[in-house]
Image: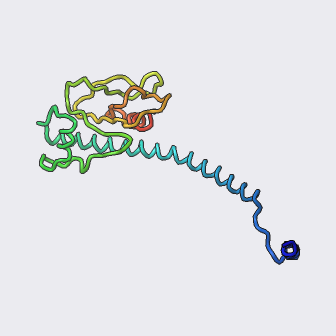
Amino acid sequence: MIRKYQEIQRRRAAGEIDGGFTLIELLIVIVVLGILAAIVVFALGSVTQKSAVAACQSDAKTVDVGASALMAENPSITNLTSSAFQTDMTSTTLTGGPFVKSWPSSTSYTVSIWGASGNTSNLVYSPAASAATPGTAVTPTYGDVLITGTGTPAAGVYNTTAYTYDASTSPVEACAFAVTGKA
């Protein structure tokens, strides 16, 4: 056994055998790769939130344009529930339909439309970037696009009490509040 070890040492000293990485070198490489991975994951977290807000804004704009077109083409449609309004917007039987090819869906927010005029029982907020309140309670008008956050906001964010926002006035803020919990 000792003779074999001495032979390996002699061959290594003569340059016939290349030495491998030491344990310390391997640990240093693993730590550096771990730090780089943590930086990348942290940077991608904000990108995914921004893309979710952008998708929400696009969905709100699509529904807003569809609702405006539906009401312009079919002025007899009044005082519908949100689900009936949604059905009419995707219907092919109405004049000019379908106004929205398919209803937008997401796991972080829902898009609806205010179709029940005079109903003030729902809490709808106008977004305002204030830590004290998520916004002021408003009664939306017929055809307004509403954005509702489906997640529970983390502690310290603005909209800890309200989840539904009137996106017709400010879709950027409404989507930011509903998706991330802050403007």
Task: From the top left corner, tell me how far across and down residue 156 is, in percent.
Answer: 50, 28
Q: Is residue 91 above or below residue 142?
A: below
Q: Quadrant of the C terminus?
A: top left
Task: From the top left corner, tell me how far across and down residue 169 is, in percent.
Answer: 33, 32
* Coloring applied to the structure: rainbow
Q: Is residue 93 above or below residue 78?
A: below
Pick the front one: 86 or 38: 38
Identify the residue at image location x=51%, y=43%: 46
Relative to residue 59, is residue 8 drawn left or right? right
Q: How many marks?
A: 0
Task: From the top left corner, tell me how far across and down residue 97 is, in percent.
Answer: 17, 48
Identify the residue at image location x=19%, y=28%: 117
Q: Is residue 137 above or below residue 40?
A: above
Task: From the top left corner, tell me how far across and down residue 42 is, in percent.
Answer: 56, 45
Name, please, the residue furthest toward the front: 1
Q: Quadrant of the N terminus?
A: bottom right
Identify the residue at image location x=80%, y=75%: 17
Instruction: Tell me the quarter of the picture where residue 3 sits.
Output: bottom right
